Image (cartoon, rainbow, N blue to C red):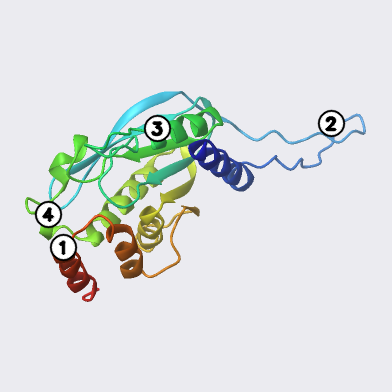
Amino acid sequence: MKYAVLRAGLFGILLAGCVAEPVPLPSSDGAGRVAAKAEPCAAVAAASETVRVANDFGRIEGTLEVPEGCGPLPVVLILSGSGTSDRNGNVPGEREQPHIYRVLSETLVAGGFAVLRYDDAGIAGSVSGAPAKVEDFRFDHEIADAARFVAELRKDARFGAVVVAGHSQGSLTGIMASQLQPIDALISLAGTGRPIAQLLREQLEKRLNEQELALLDAALAKL
């Protein structure tokens, strides 16, 4: 149920913000009537494509779904939350595999939006996109990867408005990436409004033992 609400809410926001009825421009048709001026249409064919961008370690890979329509089309870049998830929104090793980003993408494409979603660095098609040592990975790397995909979408003549939809931590990723590459809109899906150290402590305190919590607190104190 919560996934249905999530995708319905996002679709409503995008529909309101990126799709507008054309405003008729008056012109004489020789019979005293006012006719609407037809806007040129650049036909866009439906497609499902693999998109890859190079980063500092290797490459990041994602899937771009494009509906048939009249371009330029609005395109949505989905940014995942904390942890490591694939382009479908699934976390390796977890019992539940909800495919949340894939389902969201399918809904948006059916509504006329192109959608790009990608594997986080270190897994699936992006396994080469992470440093060899996990401790060398930084949040700045996530931000840079998101900005690279925005740049790819900007270069594609099929697309007009570039919208970033950040889920949870992905909201912050999107905000920071927009400082590197311009976007037209940002949608925060369950983004947090609290300090990151406080949020991480609350999320992890029930899963860690006392020794691990002490290490976590020491790390958070450095943020």
Task: Provide residue 41's location: percent of width, then percent of height.
Answer: 58, 31
Mark 3, secondary structure of its residue: helix
Q: Which residue is mark 1?
A: 212
CA distance separating discs 2 and 4: 67 Å
Label 2 neighbourhood size at 10 Å, few (<14), some (14-19), many (20+)?
few
Residue marked by disc 2: 29
Which numbered disc, 4 or 1, marks the residue that appears first in the sequence? 4
Q: Quadrant of the C terminus?
A: bottom left
- Residue 151 in the image: above or below residue 50: below
Q: Give the residue pinned by disc 3.
A: 102
Q: Quadrant of residue 96?
A: top left
What residue is drawn where x is 60% and y is 48%?
17
Specify which label sits upstream in the sequence, 3 or 1. Answer: 3
Instruction: Work out how far the residue at label 2 is from the one at label 1, CA to CA, in angstroms.
Output: 77 Å
40, above or below 199, in the image: above
Counting residues from the start of the chain, the first of labels 2 and 3 encountered is 2
Q: Name which residue type carries label 4.
A: Val
Q: Nearer the viewer, mark 2 or mark 3?
A: 3
Q: Where is residue 52, by image quadrant?
A: top left
Q: Considering depth in this image, is 143 or 203 the residue closer to the camera?
A: 203
Q: Position of residue 39 (x, y in %)?
A: 65, 35
